[in-house]
Image: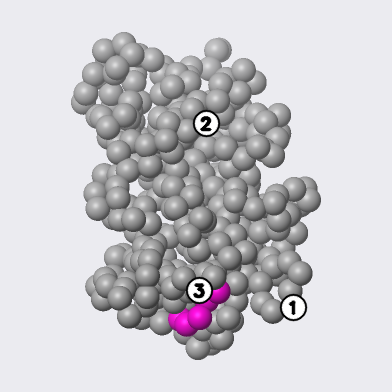
């Protein structure tokens, strides 16, 4: 599943190309792509056609395009894109009649015009868990920018419950440290809780825990304040490195808007390396299913927590 660095790579690729573009036509090629709208493809097309893309914004793994219509001072609704397991965007520059035939997994095609330049934006989704939606924007609880890519203090309704992400400059680090240290859940489960801090998925949780030397099953209440701060720093570090390399790719499902794969998988220290030696101490990387998620750690560097009697 695309995680924060992958979605940010997509956002950064889309923003300079489609910001300011007008949506001229919509072709929904699979009705389930817009399944949250009661009116289906017709309602989606009615809401999107002739709207202008004001920005391309991301919070955690969630992506949206604030839309304006004639006479609007600021966007009050957004085209939200939920990538699911395999959602992709592809941009084709040039006249619409010269755009390539839609990919077999193309679920929606939007025809755009940006200052007289024709663009085609395709939404591809092989596994069909992803979808597009048009929904109202809501004010952020702290009156600060809703996400990366825009200064607007708003988010789509479906994102309102999602916490700020680890790379968000407005993230309250002290509040995060407190939240991560509450309860009896294992710390990896806490990291995956998107309502606390968004954007940390399975891969980067394993990588951050390895870097911070914390066992994934350590109870949250047994994580010290310095360890919580180190863990946040570690999450930022591994996602920052992944972002610099275009995200993590294990197959052809994740690509950026030009159809290119990321290569951070070559730099992973824990995830996917079961049975291999730890790069730090040489001990063997272990793998177990924890909370239903494949989890990797070094038994020597990340020792299990044992409560003192």
Q: Are marks 3 and 1 in contact (CB under 8 Å)?
A: no
Q: Which residues are magenta?
A: 22-26
- Could one spot residue 218 in this view of the protein? no
Residue 37 rendering spot, x and y as whole percentages:
54, 80
Residue displayed at 21% across by 26% down = 275
Disc 3: which residue: 116
Q: Which mark is residue 169?
A: none
Residue 284 rendering spot, x and y as whole percentages:
25, 19
In magenta stretch: residue 25: yes
Element assignment for label 3: loop
The alpha-carbon separation of the residues under discs 2 and 3 comes to: 40 Å
**In the drawing, does residue 202 fall left or right of residue 47?**
left
Residue 77's place in the image compared with 200, above or below, is: below
Residue displayed at 41% across by 41% down = 202
Near mark 3 (Cα within 10 A), the count class, few <14, some 14-19 or many ≥20, is few
Disc 2: which residue: 236
Residue 206's place in the image compared with 88, above or below, is: above
Residue 184 falls in image quadrant = top right
Give whichever of discs 2 and 3 has the lower sequence position: 3
Residue 286's place in the image compared with 71, above or below, is: above
**In the drawing, does residue 71 fall left or right of residue 233?**
right
Name the foreground residue: 238 vs 17: 17
Q: Which mark is residue 71?
A: 1
């Amino acid at each position: 599943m695309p995680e924060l660095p992958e979605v940010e790579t997509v956002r950064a690729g889309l923003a300079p190309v489609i910001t300011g573009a007008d949506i001229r036509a919509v072709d929904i090629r699979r009705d389930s792509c817009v399944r949250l709208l009661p009116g289906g493809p017709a309602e989606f097309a009615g809401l999107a056609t002739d709207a202008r893309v004001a920005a391309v914004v991301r919070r955690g793994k969630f992506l949206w395009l604030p839309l304006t219509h004639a006479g609007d001072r600021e966007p009050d609704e957004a085209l939200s894109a939920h990538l699911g397991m395999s959602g992709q965007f592809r941009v084709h520059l040039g006249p619409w009649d010269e755009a390539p035939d839609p990919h077999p997994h193309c679920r929606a095609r939007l025809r755009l015009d940006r200052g007289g330049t024709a663009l085609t934006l395709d939404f591809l989704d092989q596994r069909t868990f992803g979808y597009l939606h048009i929904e109202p924007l809501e004010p952020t609880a702290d009156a600060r920018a809703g996400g990366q890519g825009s200064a607007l203090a708003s988010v789509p309704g479906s994102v309102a419950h999602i916490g700020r992400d680890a790379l968000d400059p407005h993230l309250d680090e002290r509040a995060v440290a407190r939240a991560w240290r509450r309860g009896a859940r294992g710390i990896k489960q806490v990291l995956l809780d998107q309502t606390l801090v968004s954007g940390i998925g399975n891969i980067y949780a394993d990588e951050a825990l390895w870097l911070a030397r914390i066992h994934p099953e350590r109870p949250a209440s047994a994580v010290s304040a310095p360890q919580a701060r180190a863990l946040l720093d570690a999450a930022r570090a591994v996602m920052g490195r992944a972002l610099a390399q275009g995200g993590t790719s294990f197959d052809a499902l994740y690509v950026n808007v030009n159809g290119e794969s990321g290569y951070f998988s070559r730099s992973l220290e824990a995830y996917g390396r079961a049975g291999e030696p730890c790069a730090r101490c040489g001990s063997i990387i272990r793998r177990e299913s924890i909370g239903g998620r494949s989890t990797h750690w070094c038994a020597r560097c990340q020792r299990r927590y044992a409560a003192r009697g």
